[in-house]
Each structure stands twice: as C-alpha cells, then as structure tokens.
Image (cartoon, grey):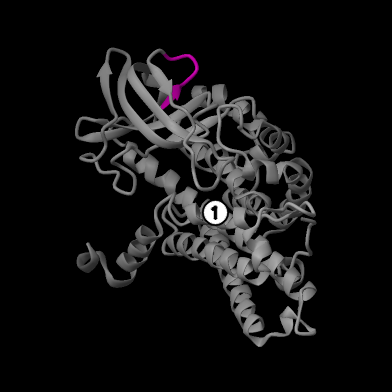
Amino acid sequence: MNEVPRTQDRMWHDLGIPEEIAALRAEMRTAVAERLAPYAREIGRREETADSFPWKAFRGLAEAGAFAVPFTAEYGRGLAHPLLGTCTVTEEIAYHSSSMAGVYDGQCILVPKALSFAGAELQARLLPGLISGDLVFSFATTEPDASSDLSVDSLRTEAVEDGDGFVVNGRKRWITNSVVADWVTVLCRTGNGMTMLAVDLKNSEGVRVGKPDLKMGHHGQLTADIVFENVRVPRENVLGQPGKGLSVALACLTYGRIGIAAAGVGVAQSALDLAVARLRSRHLFGKPLGAMQHWQYRLAERATELECARTLYQKAALRVDGGERAPEPEAAMAKAFATRLAADLARDAIQIHGGYGFAREVAETGETYHLEELYRDAKILEIFEGANEIQHWLVARQLIGRDVTG
C-alpha cells in the first residue's frame, strides 16, 4: 500500500523540544525511509527462522548513524539529550516496523545502558562494534519462571564465583536478537544477590542458543532461549558490582519502557495516518466515510491521546537526560498509555478499512495492506519491558503510597 500523508506534520508541534532532537528526527526520518521502509513489509510477514534476521535494515540503520545516537562524543553522537534522541529514532522506526523497533531497543537502549556500568576497557572493546553494527547484542533478564518478578527467589540462572571469574548455569527466555547475537548481558543469581555479566556468546564454551520462537507478531524481532552450561565469564565482564546486578537491570528496564512507549507512539501514529487517509478516500452512501460524526469524534479523541502519549515519553526521557535516575511516574505512565493506544488505534483503523483492514493482500488485484501486521505487533508492546499492569502498579505506588499498595 502506498505511503499516506503524515497527520503528525500538521497536528503536532515541536514546542519545548531541543533543536538537536528536532534536527535528529528529520535526519532519521529520511534515513528510516531509505534504509528500513523498503524492507518493512517483508520483515513483518516472513516467519521467524535463523536466516530471517533483518540484516539489510539493521546494517542500513547502523550505516546511517542510528546506533551512535545513545553514546557520548567519545564513541557516538555526543547529544546533550541522548535518551530522548534514541527514543525519537525508535518512534520513527516503529512507524514503519514495530518489530524493527524491538531490535533497535535491544541494541541501542537496553544494552547501551547495561554497558554504561562496564569498565573502560570492556567499553572500548565492545562499543565501536555495537555502533557500527558489526556486533549484535542481546539483553537477558527473563527466564521461563521469571519476568515481571526478578526477585532472587524467582531467578534460576546462577553465576558462581570461581577463581578470577564466574561459572554460569541456567536458561534465559524470549531473548531479542539472540539468534544472531555476538554478546549478551545476563542477569544472574549470585548467592543472596544478583550480578549482571557480559557474556561473549560466540567464543564461550557451554552456550547454546535455541531456534527462533514462532510468535503472533514482531516477526523481525527474533527471540530464542539461551542456555548456559558451565560457561566461564571473566571478572572484568561484570557490569556494575557483584551482587548489585538488580539495580543495573532495573535501570536498563526503566530506559527500555520509555523506549517502548516511543515505539507505541510510532505504531499509533502509523495507524492514525492510515485511518485518516481511508476516511478521506472511502465513500459510503454518497459521502466520504469521514463525514460520519462517529469517526470524526473517535479520531479526534485518538489524536488527542496521541499528543499526550508523545509528550509523556518525551518528558520521561528529558528527566533522565537531566540526570534523574527514576523518572516516575512519567516512565510508567508513558509505557502503559502509549502501548494501549497503539493497540486501540490499530483496531480502529482496521474497523475503518473494513475487510481491507483484515486482509494482508487482495489476491485478484495484488493490493496489499499492513494493518493486520500493525495489530499483531501492537499487542506485544503491552506485555514486554514490564507488562502494563506492572506500570499501573508503579503509578499507584507513587500516587497512593507504598505503605498501602505494597
């Protein structure tokens, strides 16, 4: 289906956004259109296999400088507002491919934050390859029985100190990019605490990566189990301090949920634009479908919600870039609100398109539509990086008080 006009260009205003970020959005919108958009529908449709990782888009975005956005001038762009910049890029990517935004989230939001806790030597070893796209990274906290609950009692992957390092045993699940990853940052139980480690997947004995999971959506975001059997990890690969890994993981996940909020905004914007274009072009009973007051009011509400969602993630990111470690309640609000909106707007856009919204392709004419992909992809945004129910709990704890909510 042909590109439709962006309502964002006439409905949203850049008031209060740093000039460097406005310029970055324009730059990356062009880069995403050139490096990702031509492959986006193929990425969204093909079934997950070991050979289906979206290499062309991944390397194209790296070559365009998208992977350098999170980093200081020593290695990357040196933005004054790196998280806001990275989230802005995420939104632009998600507009065309939510699953590619998931790939970018792992490579450029979760892992960079984890590696900010690494020693200078390890950073010098890994960051140039991350930024160039020559190295692929994964972030691993989730396990078969541990996801929202990352307590030491739930975690089963264990790192035992042994000589000048650790020996790791366990299994991680739903790990983005793992099928092709060179390195992974892993949260492990160490005694009564936890430790975050960087593990060289390609050069460590005892590592096994499973086949890609077959999912309802996000087909370009390959996930799989990673199994560790007596994997030796040198002490210099500890991220932060031994026994203090949970704080590292939670810091990363705070960044991650702001990024997923930005992805939700990108998906919602894409769905809104498709809906508006259809309301203008589809005629029913002699009038444009958009003449029906029901859809006028519904999309006016959605446009208002989209404005709020974008402002929430930007505010959370600005607080982080301003030096705040826990930008609540905005981070949790942004994640829950934007991702719910993405699913709601995708559903509305399908309803507006009728049977065409439900179709991937009309066989007789060859017309293609991707609203079914948007709808499939939107659902996972409400689940990963902290289920939305957890985000509501975080807001409630601050609103009502932890002494009451627990």
Q: Is residue 195 above or below residue 286?
A: above
Disc 1: which residue: 376
Horizontally, is 175 left or right of 28 in the view? left
Question: Which quadrant is home to the C terminus?
Answer: bottom left
The residue at the point 58 percent across, 38 percent down is: 47
Residue at 47% x, 21% y: name it: 201
Tally the marks.
1
Q: Could you tell me which secondary element the residue under label 1 belongs to?
A: helix
Q: Image quarter for residue 307? A: bottom right
Q: Assess disc 1: are there few (<14), some (14-19) or many (≥20) residues with their C-alpha within 10 Å of its C-alpha.
A: many
Q: Residue furthest bottom?
A: 293
Q: The residue under label 1 is which amino acid type?
A: Arg
Residue 326 within the magenta-colored segment of the rendering? no
For the record, the magenta segment spans 198-204
| Left or right: where 97 falls relative to 141 | right
Q: Position of residue 82 (x, y in %)?
A: 60, 47
